[in-house]
Image (tube, rainbow, N blue to C red):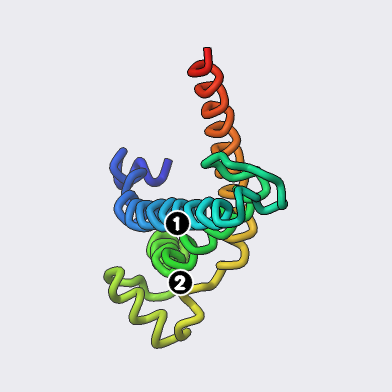
Amino acid sequence: ATIYKREGVRGFYSAWRPTVARNVPFVVATFTANDFMKRKIIKDRMAKQGKNFAGEVDTSNELTIRENLLVGISSALIGAVCTHPADVVKTRMMTQAASTQVPYSSATDCILTMFKAEGLPAFYSGFVQRMLYMGPLWSIQFAINGRLCKSLEERNMKKQRK
């Protein structure tokens, strides 16, 4: 109610720019890393006479659930490494009103103040906690997506045979 009284409806969307500035690069880095790793695994599989991560013969262009889980965690890690500093700055900017410290005048001021006062590690504060939920979340997402794609591929192949 306080935000609405002070800023109106626009107050609820005041942080959309920094959120988008963090989310878009995270998704781009995560999906790019996922695609790169997926292609590498499939290429390596074909070089090994079609044997997958578990040593089973698999000539499909989709990863196994196990491979997708591994690639999903790795992709999320790469995305988080690339974007976590922006997330920390965004969070500091968004929560500064609740602090008793002098507010940051801009994102640049926030970055410089953090670097001078706390050093480079400050930009990765909370990284482990973020990975504890992001790793499993993205690994499950890519595993489900991989399994769904494989099922659709098998279904299409059955239709083509008829």
Q: Mark 2, residues whose alpha carbon is within 10 Å: few (<14), some, or many (≥20)? A: few
Residue name at image x 30 percent, y 69 percent? 107
Say what amino acid the circle numbered 2 marks. Thr
Residue name at image x 33 percent, y 45 percent? 13
Residue name at image x 52 percent, y 23 percent? 157
List x then y, in percent, for residue 136.
64, 51
Residue labelled with disc 1: 36
List x then y, in percent, for residue 104.
33, 72
Quarter placement of the N terminus = top left
What secondary structure is found at the residue carrying circle 1?
helix
Say what amino acid the circle numbered 1 marks. Phe
Residue 21 in the figure: left or right of residue 135: left
Pick whichever, 142 or 155, lies toward us: 155
* Residue 131: image tag: none
> Marks 2 and 1: which is nearer the front?
1
Q: Which residue is farthest top?
A: 162
Could you tell which of marks 2 and 1 lies nearer the N-terminus?
1
List x then y, in percent, for residue 155.
55, 22
Residue 19 in the figure: left or right of residue 150: left
Pick whichever, 46 or 90, lies toward us: 46
* Residue 100: image tag: 2
Pick whichever, 86 or 34, lies toward us: 34
Q: How many marks?
A: 2
Pick whichever, 5 or 162, lies toward us: 162
